[in-house]
Image (tube, rainbow, N blue to C red):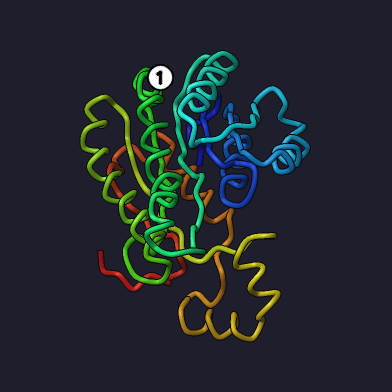
Amino acid sequence: MDLLLNQASAIVSGGTKGIGLAIVNNFLKEGMNVTTFSRNKKNINAAKRKFNSYADQINVLQANILDENNCKKIIDSHIKKFNSLDVLVNNAGESVKNGKIKEKWDESFSINVTAHVTFSELAIPHLEKSNIGGNIVNISSIFGRESGGSPQYNASKAAMISFSKSYASLLIKKGIRVNTIAPGSIRFAGGSWDKRVKKEPKEMKNFIKQNIPAGRFGTVEEIADVVTFLCSPKASWIVGSALNVDGGQSRSNI
């Protein structure tokens, strides 16, 4: 299926590892122009090496999404290089677990919610000019709908789902679609589930058996494939949705 994304352009936050890296890879294969960024210099250099053959299509920056001025500079850099913006994927995030709930509450909401709201607002003037219809995809979690993570993490991911639904109703009037992906447990090299499998193989085998009907962890490519479709004109009637991509792991009916 031709997703009609050739020559479209996107910004993907946190696109130098894990789910974000897989999304960038998909976009480049579709012929898209992509800007991504990270705070981690090592991950930036690794991404540049990985995408060396796409040098004309990729713009990899070191930046902190928590800094609004950084966000402005990222968008300016993208527009200067690629002239337009069609897609924004708000993928950057952290599972802020250590410490007391009250101490970690603001930190969790800053990276998992507020930064994405700020970035989205800055991107709107460019997204509404898109020739294929602007798109924002927010990466949340199934634990934004049910228990399973830390209270502050769950609350921040729930907030992102709720915000996205309301935001979608506003932005569709400007020709911009907003949707959310809620991944389940995803394993990738160096990720938290990968570390736990290597440290506690028996416990993780039991976890899968008890919690994931599909019988395995998900892959970053499976998340990226859904994101890519959502960003395409083929998904034009999907507005304000929060899609679980979880192998049946979620137990929520909503």
- Pick the quarter of the image with the C terminus: bottom left
Q: Estimate the x, y position of residue 5 in percent, counting from the top left.
A: 50, 31
Residue 129, position in %: x, y? Answer: 37, 17
Q: Name above or below for residue 131 compared with residue 63.
A: above
Numbered-mark total: 1
State the residue in front, 130 or 183: 183
Q: Residue at x 63, y 37 (%)?
A: 29
Horizontal side of 145 relative to 49 (left or right) equals left
Q: Is residue 235 left or right of residue 8?
A: left
Report the front residue among 125 and 42. 42
In this rendering, is residue 46 above or below 121?
below
Q: Position of residue 85 (x, y in %)?
A: 47, 23
Residue type at mark 1: give it: His
Local secondary structure at mark 1: helix
Rendered image quadrant of residue 57: top right
Q: Residue at x 52, y 14 (%)?
A: 83
Rendered location of residue 53, percent (x, y): 76, 31
Density class for disc 1 (Cα within 10 Å; few <14, some 14-19, many ≥20) is: some
Q: Quadrant of residue 175?
A: top left
45 relative to 96 in the view: left or right:
right
**Which residue appears at 70% of the width and 74% of the height?**
198
Is 252 situated above or below 28? below
Q: Mark 1 highlights which residue? A: 126
